[in-house]
Every structure is written in structure tokens, then in C-alpha cells.
Amino acid sequence: MARPVKWRKIEHIPKTTYFVPSGDDTGTPKNTLLLEELEAVRLKDLEGLEQEECAVRMDVSRPTFQRILLSAREKIADSLVNGKGIHIDGGNYTRSICPVSCADCGREWTESRENLETLKSCPHCRSTRLSCGQNCRGGFCRENRRRRGQGG
């Protein structure tokens, strides 16, 4: 059985998603920077946070944050040094974490909105009477979620 997707929490989605070298023609190669990679660069290099704090804000381990950051920096450096474009797109990310509660056992926990779509029962008592604590339509959140394949 495949391991479930680990969603990375991001706080910022850029308005501009494509950068090209000056005088570019349409045949220039490009690097695809995933949204979680951009978020790692934003938190570490723009906001100047320590890696541990960045990892907490993205809801990943510190080693995972380090791998995401190194991948992003490699793509950015390759683009700058070799005159490649940068396209920001894709990844496994969430904008929101929801509080979930079980009506039968009273347990409460948090899940990404994406995991709520596949959550069928309480992991403690197996009850199907679950609800999101954010007063969402239909009992669960359905907004601010993305899962896209990685680009080249």
C-alpha cells in the first residue's frame, strides 16, 4: 500500500508564476519550482526564519524542509546561471488545516482539508459521525486544496 500524501502547508500563492530571461524567445528551457519550494525560500530567505520554525509553519519535519529548500535553491541557481526560465506550479500543498471532531467519542484532532476528503471514520472509535470545526457546508471543508503533478 502506498504511503499517503503528506501535504505541505503554505501561506502564500504568488500572483506571478512565470519568469523568463530578458530577450527570451519561446524556446528557452525552464525549471518548474513547486509551490512548497517557493514557500520554503520565502520563509527562510525572505522572512529570515530559522529552519525549525520554517518546518513548523509548513507542517513538515526539519530534514524534509531542508530537502525542499535545497531543491528550490538548486532550480533557482540553475535558472540564473544558465539563463533558464522559472515556472511556479504544482506540488502537494494545503492552505488550511481543519479541526475535526467525532460526535461519538468526543475526540478532536487536526487534518488538512485534503485528507478530510478521504477520511471516512474516526481513527479512535471508527465512528462515521465526524465534523469540521469551521462550520463548513456538508460537514467538511472543500476549498483551498491543490494536488498537481510535478513539472520538469
Image (spheres, helix red, strand yellow):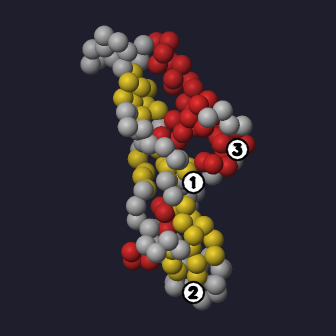
Number of marks in the rendered image: 3
Residue 151, image x and y in percent? 41, 35
Secondary structure, mark 3, is: helix
Return the residue at label 1. 6
Secondary structure, mark 1, is: loop
Residue 100, image x and y in percent? 56, 73
Quadrant holding the N terminus: bottom right
Asked whether residue 122 appears in the rendered view, the answer is: yes
Sequence-wise, which precedes: disc 1 or disc 2?
A: 1
Front: mark 2 or 3: 3
Dot 1 and dot 2 residues touching (CB under 8 Å): no
Residue 26, image x and y in percent? 26, 19
Residue 76, image x and y in percent? 51, 23
Q: CA distance from mark 1 to mark 2?
A: 26 Å
Q: Nearer the viewer, residue 17 or 4?
A: 17
Q: Nearer the viewer, residue 43 or 21?
A: 43
Front: mark 1 or 3: 3
Residue at figure coordinates x 35%, y 12% from the top left:
22
Q: Amino acid at mark 2?
A: Ala
Secondary structure, mark 2, is: loop
Instruction: Give the class, few, some or many, for how many residues have Cα within 10 Å of label 1's Cα (few <14, many ≥20).
Output: some
Residue at figure coordinates x 43%, y 56% from the top left:
145
Sequence-wise, which precedes: disc 1 or disc 3?
A: 1
Image quarter of residue 97? bottom right
Q: Which mark is residue 47?
A: none
Q: Which mark is residue 53?
A: 3
Return the residue at label 2. 103
